[in-house]
């Protein structure tokens, strides 16, 4: 599910935004850099959506972190595990 919720949309966003920016006269390098910036912002939002979906389906946070790392979705432990402590406070 993480691939469908996070990686696929972010890849499409990067490619489409780079193509659209190229049509407006930007160079490919600048278009890709801006596209990656837009994709990175969307990655953060979609990561939260994926995390909430998984937690609603009773996936353990440690397992969620391992799956996210394996699927190239999330490399940061604090985005999954450490936020549990913040939510409990």
Image (tube, grey):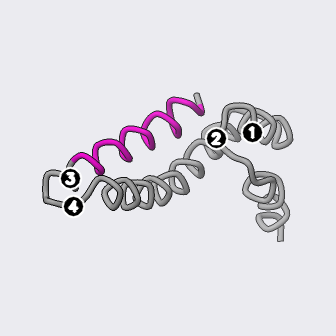
Look at the numbered disc 4 and give the secondary structure of its residue: loop
User: How many C-alpha atoms fall within 10 Å of the one at disc 2: few (<14), some, or many (≥20)?
Assistant: many
The quarter holding residue 66 reads: top right
Q: Does the stretch in magenta take in 18?
A: yes
Decide which of tag 4 and tag 2 comes sooner along the chain.
Answer: 4
Relative to 5, residue 26 above or below = below
Q: Which residue is mark 4?
A: 26
Front residue (pair 46, 20): 20
Decide which of tag 2 and tag 3 comes sooner along the chain.
Answer: 3
Q: Which residues are magenta?
A: 2-19
Distance CA(mark 3)–CA(mark 4): 5 Å
The N terminus sits in image quarter: top right
Marks 1 and 3 in Cβ contact (< 8 Å): no
Distance CA(mark 2)–CA(mark 3): 27 Å
User: How many C-alpha atoms fall within 10 Å of the one at disc 3: few (<14), some, or many (≥20)?
Assistant: some
Q: Looking at the image, is mark 2 or mark 3 nearer the viewer? A: 3
Q: Which residue is mark 1?
A: 69
Write the residue at 73% across / 57% down: 79
Distance CA(mark 4)–CA(mark 1): 34 Å
Q: Which residue is mark 2?
A: 73
Distance CA(mark 1)–CA(mark 2): 6 Å
Marks 3 and 4 in Cβ contact (< 8 Å): yes
Front residue (pair 71, 34): 34
Q: Which residue is mark 3?
A: 22
Would residue 87 appear left or right of 45 to someone viewing this image? right
- Residue 18: x percent and y percent? 30, 50
Front residue (pair 70, 58): 70
Q: Looking at the image, is mark 4 or mark 1 nearer the viewer? A: 4
């Amino acid at each position: 599910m993480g691939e469908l919720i996070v990686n696929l949309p972010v890849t499409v966003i990067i490619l489409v935004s780079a193509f659209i920016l190229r049509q407006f006269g930007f160079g490919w390098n600048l278009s890709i850099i801006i596209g990656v910036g837009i994709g990175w912002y969307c990655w953060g939002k979609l990561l939260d959506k994926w995390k909430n979906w998984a937690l609603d389906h009773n996936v353990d946070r440690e397992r969620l972190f391992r799956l996210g790392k394996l699927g190239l979705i999330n490399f940061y432990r604090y985005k999954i595990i450490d936020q549990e402590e913040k939510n409990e406070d």
